[in-house]
Image (cartoon, rainbow, N blue to C red):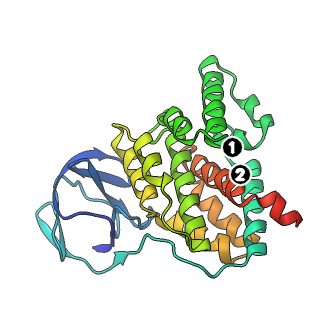
């Protein structure tokens, strides 16, 4: 049974791309659509099925229906992936950014990009190639926050292994933070977002789709829940939501959170604001 359809999925015929335990990815003209189990949750490109995934081999999206393995399913619910708010309490938000930083330092996997928030975490990277990754990531992030944004994004793109390299997860978090700022302060569209998106473009379809959605301000269910908690709720809910995000991949969720947290700290100058 189809229970949710992402709001950024395009109509058309899709080809099988990759298959995992809880996710089956399909592709059409470089655009991803993912059939996922309910435990994965909604997302801009997710088609959520109730129960275990059957062996899937074909997908077609029409205006009012999804056809899986030749069987048509009506679209019952559209997942709304955009975060929108102008109603926020600065004191609550600044406190929650600090809570997010503390959660990352205390709970992020030891080989996540949370080392960017504390030099002590670099001790976990012992092998030569790991230390090289640390060096490259640190230099790239220094460029990003040191006035050479696009050069830094280009250098960070593709850093790390896995389905979505750590650098790409960080960039997606950075883009999400920029969208949050624009929504919260009712600012015009950020002219840097299209440039960041182009600088981070890659031939890794899964990572590229993540960044494409982030550039459009489209979030998955866990990320959207955290964004809402950051502007409205207390530390317990922010911690709970951050823990949920960190469950994604070995370090992907924590790497995304690190990009989000560092960009919010930089854009809002949280330390200065809290001390005012």
Q: Secondary structure at mark 2?
A: helix
Q: Is residue 83 above or below residue 87?
A: above
Q: Secondary structure at mark 1?
A: helix
Residue at 61%, 41% (x, y): give it: 144
Q: Quadrant of residue 34?
A: bottom left
Q: Check disc 2: other Cα within 10 Å, few if <14, some if 14-19, many if 20+.
A: many
From this viewpoint, which residue is outermost toward the left?
A: 70
Which numbered disc flags the more N-terminal residue, 1 or 2?
A: 2
Residue at 64%, 49% (x, y): give it: 258
Q: CA distance from mark 1 to mark 2?
A: 6 Å
Q: Are marks 1 and 2 in contact (CB under 8 Å)?
A: yes
Q: Residue 99 in the image: state x and y as whole percent.
A: 76, 62
Q: Which residue is mark 2?
A: 104
Q: Is residue 160 visible?
A: no
Query: In the depicted view, which residue is nearer to us: 189 or 99?
Result: 189
Q: Check disc 1: other Cα within 10 Å, few if <14, some if 14-19, many if 20+.
A: many
220 horizontally vs 256: left or right: left
Residue at 67%, 55% (x, y): give it: 261
Q: Residue 141 in the image: state x and y as whole percent.
A: 63, 38
Query: In the depicted view, which residue is nearer to us: 209 or 276?
Result: 276
207 horizontally vs 229: left or right: left
Q: Is residue 265 above or below residue 149?
A: below
Q: Quadrant of residue 269?
A: bottom right
Q: Quadrant of residue 238?
A: bottom right
Q: Which residue is mark 1?
A: 114
From this viewpoint, which residue is outermost toward the top?
A: 128
Residue 204 numbered mark, or none? none
């Amino acid at each position: 049974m189809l229970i949710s359809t992402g709001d950024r999925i395009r109509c058309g015929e899709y080809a099988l791309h990759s298959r995992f335990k809880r996710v089956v990815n399909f592709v059409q003209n470089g655009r991803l659509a993912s059939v996922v189990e309910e435990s994965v949750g909604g997302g801009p490109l997710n088609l959520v099925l109730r129960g275990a995934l059957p062996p899937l081999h074909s997908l077609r999206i029409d205006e009012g229906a999804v056809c899986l393995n030749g069987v048509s399913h009506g679209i019952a619910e559209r997942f709304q992936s955009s975060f929108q708010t102008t109603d926020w309490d600065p004191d609550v938000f600044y406190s929650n950014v600090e809570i997010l930083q503390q959660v990352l330092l205390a709970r992020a996997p030891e080989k996540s990009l949370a080392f960017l928030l504390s030099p002590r975490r670099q001790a976990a990277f012992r092998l030569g190639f790991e230390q090289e990754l640390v060096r490259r990531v640190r230099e790239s992030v220094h460029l990003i926050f040191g006035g050479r944004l696009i050069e830094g994004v280009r250098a960070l793109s593709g850093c790390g292994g896995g389905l979505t390299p750590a650098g790409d997860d960080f960039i997606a978090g950075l883009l999400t933070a920029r969208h949050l700022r624009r929504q919260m302060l009712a600012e015009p569209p950020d002219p840097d977002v299209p440039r960041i998106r182009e600088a981070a473009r890659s031939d890794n379809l899964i990572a590229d789709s993540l960044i494409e959605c982030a550039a459009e301000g489209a979030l998955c269910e866990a990320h959207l829940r955290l964004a809402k908690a950051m502007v409205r709720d207390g530390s317990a809910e922010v911690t709970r939501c951050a823990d949920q995000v960190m469950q994604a991949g070995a370090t992907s969720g924590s790497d995304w959170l690190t990009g989000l947290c560092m960009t919010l700290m930089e854009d809002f100058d949280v330390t200065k604001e809290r001390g005012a």
